[in-house]
Image: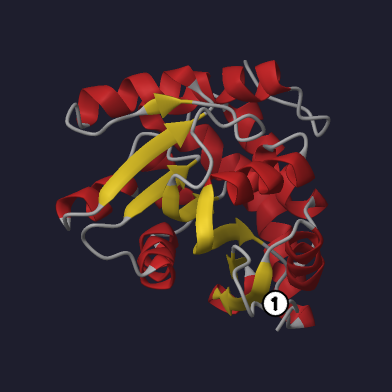
């Protein structure tokens, strides 16, 4: 079975996602108890893209998030590091302009996009600071970034329950719906290892992003961070 380690070697991460691509969307629905659909709606609202604007959807997987923008008339580019995910996405939606690309070396020109978004993918990047710099490079001045990522529940009793789910329930559930249970063991470990909301906000600020803010979804299981590429009069801070 294929899985990555917390060292996040790029070839291991890509291979792991290649191996789960066929059943990835179904497994996500089951393991998130359907919450992933709600989280995607919040991402779309935070990006607030309008027809005529160009959006980069990083870690797009098979394009389930991308297609909703495309269907609304947004010029959206789905990009993923896993060629297996991209292949499945092209089968599902051949009309979408899928790109296989590395978040730490994006194959796009400077200031190409009005907005960049990445959901549940930043955690899998080996060099997060470099990826944030690349996202800033391809975003137009004043453009926005939306990061949706697993985080830390804010209420201690709920956090203990969530830790139990990650360590015990999720791996067992993955055995029932996925052909690659080790990949979902990595998922649980990578969530536990990931920084909390305010720490990620400071990382964004250090990376050059302005007006950094976040809000919690599902009690802090997920945090939605929003930031802007600097423009004249931009101010920094984490709110």
Residue 179 visible? The answer is: no
The image quadrant that residue 13 belongs to is top right
Which residue is labeled 1 in the image?
158
Sort mark 1 into few (<14), some (14-19) or many (20+) by Cα contacts within 10 Å.
some
Q: In the rendering, at what x and y percent does residue 68 appear? A: 24, 53
Quick check: 131 above or below 205?
above
Which quarter of the rendered picture does the C terminus lie within?
bottom right
Q: Up-down: is 31 above or below 12? A: below
Quadrant containing the N terminus is top right
Where does residue 165 sit, x and y in percent of width and height? 66, 58
For image coordinates 48% across by 56% down, the residue present is 32
Q: Give left or right: position of 25 versus 92.
A: right
Which element carries disc 1, helix, strand or loop? helix
Name the residue rendered at 48%, 53% in the picture.
Answer: 116
Q: Nearer the viewer, residue 67 or 2?
A: 67
Residue at the front extreme of this rendering: 232
Q: Residue 65, image x and y in percent?
A: 34, 49
| In the depicted structure, whether residue 87 falls above or below residue 98 | above
How many marks the image carries: the answer is 1
Give the colouring mode of the picture. Answer: secondary structure
Residue at 36 percent of width and 60 percent of height: 37
- Seen in the picture, residue 45 relative to 126 is either above or below; the reply is below
Q: How far across and down, in percent of the image, does residue 40 sit?
A: 39, 61
Q: Is residue 163 visible?
A: yes
Q: Is residue 24 left or right of residue 19?
A: left
Quadrant of res 34: bottom left
Depth order, front residue of 235/115? 235
Residue drawn at the location 50% of the way across and 47% of the way down: 111
């Amino acid at each position: 079975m294929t899985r990555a380690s917390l060292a996040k070697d790029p070839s291991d991460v890509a291979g792991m996602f290649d191996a789960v691509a066929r059943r990835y969307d179904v497994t996500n629905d089951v393991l998130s108890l359907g919450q992933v659909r709600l989280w995607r709606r919040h991402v779309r609202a935070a990006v607030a893209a309008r027809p005529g604007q160009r959006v980069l959807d990083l870690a797009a997987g098979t394009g389930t998030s991308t297609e909703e923008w495309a269907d609304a008339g947004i010029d959206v580019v789905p990009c993923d590091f896993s060629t297996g995910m991209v292949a499945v996405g092209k089968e599902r939606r051949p009309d979408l302009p899928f790109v296989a690309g590395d978040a730490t070396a994006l194959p796009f020109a400077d200031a190409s996009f009005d907005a960049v978004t990445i959901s549940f993918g930043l955690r899998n990047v080996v060099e997060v600071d470099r990826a944030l710099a690349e996202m800033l490079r391809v975003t137009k001045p004043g453009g926005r970034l939306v990061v949706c990522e697993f985080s830390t529940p804010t209420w201690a009793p709920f956090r203990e329950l969530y830790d139990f789910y990650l360590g015990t329930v999720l791996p067992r559930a993955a055995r029932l719906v996925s052909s690659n249970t080790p990949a979902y063991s990595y998922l649980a470990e990578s969530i536990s290892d990931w920084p909390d909301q305010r720490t990620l906000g400071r990382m964004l600020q250090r990376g050059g992003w302005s007006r950094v803010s976040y809000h919690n979804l599902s009690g802090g299981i997920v945090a939605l961070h929003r930031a802007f590429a600097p423009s004249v009069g931009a101010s920094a801070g984490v709110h």
